[in-house]
Amino acid sequence: MDHEDFVVSTARAVVTAVAPDELALFGPISAAYSRAPEKVAARRGRPGEVLGSGIDVVVALVSPVALAVATATYNRLVDRAGDAVVDAGGKLWKRARDRARPAVEITDGQLAELHRMAHEKALELGLSEEQATRVADALKDELRRVE
């Protein structure tokens, strides 16, 4: 699974769990996010902004936050995979070089760290405490599911 596949599928799972009524807008929002992530996240709190998709929407949605959280999660997991390659003395690097994907097991501690990171990111992007907790919980559930 590449970066964009991970981000979109993980964010869609979070939105499905937290704000299923947004799923109809998820496609255009994720397409706009793919083109300009910072722009979409920055516009999140500005009602009536155009997301670059030709659709006027009130952007006080969970979707842009879920996409930003999924991106941060992917980046953190990639960092962990890199650490695993170094720790394994190059064995995983050889597998990666041979186009096999190194298995990255997410420990309970790492899952808790990702949960905290997601919660903080969601708060930073303007979600309420309750919504941020729901986003972080949904992300944790999704990571457990795909592990």
Image: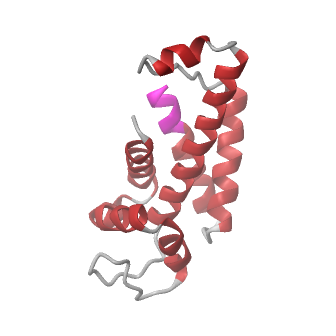
Nearest the camera: 95 or 60? 95
- Residue 142 is covered by the magenta coloring: yes
Q: Residue 88 sits in which quadrant?
A: top right
Q: Is the magenta stretch mostly helix, strand or loop?
A: helix
Identify whether 96 is placed above or below 55: above
Question: Where is 52 relative to 62, above or below?
Answer: below
Residue at the image position 61 percent from the left and 59 percent from the top: 132
Q: In this view, does 72 lie to the left or right of 31?
A: right
Q: Is residue 109 magenta?
A: no
Residue drawn where x is 66% and y is 54% of the image: 119
Q: Which residue is drawn at 63% across and 41% down?
A: 76
Which quarter of the picture shows residue 50? bottom left
Q: Position of residue 54 (x, y in %)?
A: 26, 81
The residue that appears at 53% across and 51% down in the rendered structure is: 71
Question: For the magenta stretch, what is the residue range?
Answer: 141-147
User: Quadrant where the N terminus lies?
Assistant: top left
Q: Which of 133 and 144 is in front in this view?
A: 144
Q: Position of residue 40 (x, y in %)?
A: 47, 72
Residue 58: give x, y in percent of width and height. Answer: 41, 82
